[in-house]
Image (cartoon, rainbow, N blue to C red):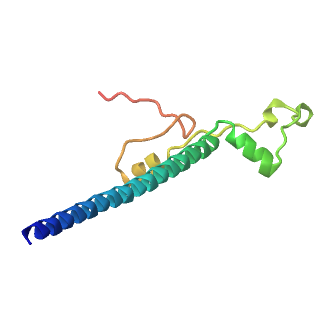
Amino acid sequence: MLVRLLHVLAVVALVGSAGYAYSIKYESIFYAEKLSKLKSQIQREKDAIAASRADWQFHVRPDRLVVLSNQHLDLKPLKIEQIKRFKDVPERQPKTDEIGKKLEAMGLSASTSTPGSGPARAATATP
């Protein structure tokens, strides 16, 4: 009777250990699949980042405005015959500092006059 009881206990211990081994196996398979999904997601995100960088490089090219104007505006350069005299060529306006002028108007900064933005004033010496 005691021998049968020991046999039953041994069988139960073996079945329990086999069940535990299978649970570890399935858990490791679950985590391996999860890891594989995460790696593929990381790869997709890296590909998306690379595509975004390539798109950004396209938009920050120095000749971007030329390409856009040629595609959408159909601009053509002036021919030399179209310019009659040198004074007919438009001049560039001096760059104004709008924020500085607003601060000057509020009395928060010193004068921001730039060359060409107003009449020149001679410095006066005070005794």
Q: Is residue 22 above or below residue 120?
A: below
The quarter of the rendered structure image containing the N terminus is: bottom left
Question: Residue at the spot x=55%, y=50% of the render?
Answer: 48
**How many numbered markers are drawn?**
0
Q: Give the image location of residue 20, x and y in percent.
A: 25, 61
Residue placed most toward the observer, 22 or 52:
22
Q: Residue furthest bottom?
A: 1
Q: Is residue 9 above or below residue 83?
A: below
Residue placed most toward the observer, 50 or 6:
6
Question: Residue at the spot x=42%, y=56% of the render?
Answer: 33
Q: Give the image location of residue 50, x and y in percent.
A: 55, 44
Q: Quadrant of residue 3?
A: bottom left
Horizontal arrangement in the rendering, residue 3 relative to residue 66 (left or right): left
Q: Give the image location of residue 111, x and y in percent.
A: 42, 41
Q: Is residue 116 above or below residue 40?
A: above
Horizontal arrangement in the rendering, residue 35 relative to residue 127 (left or right): right
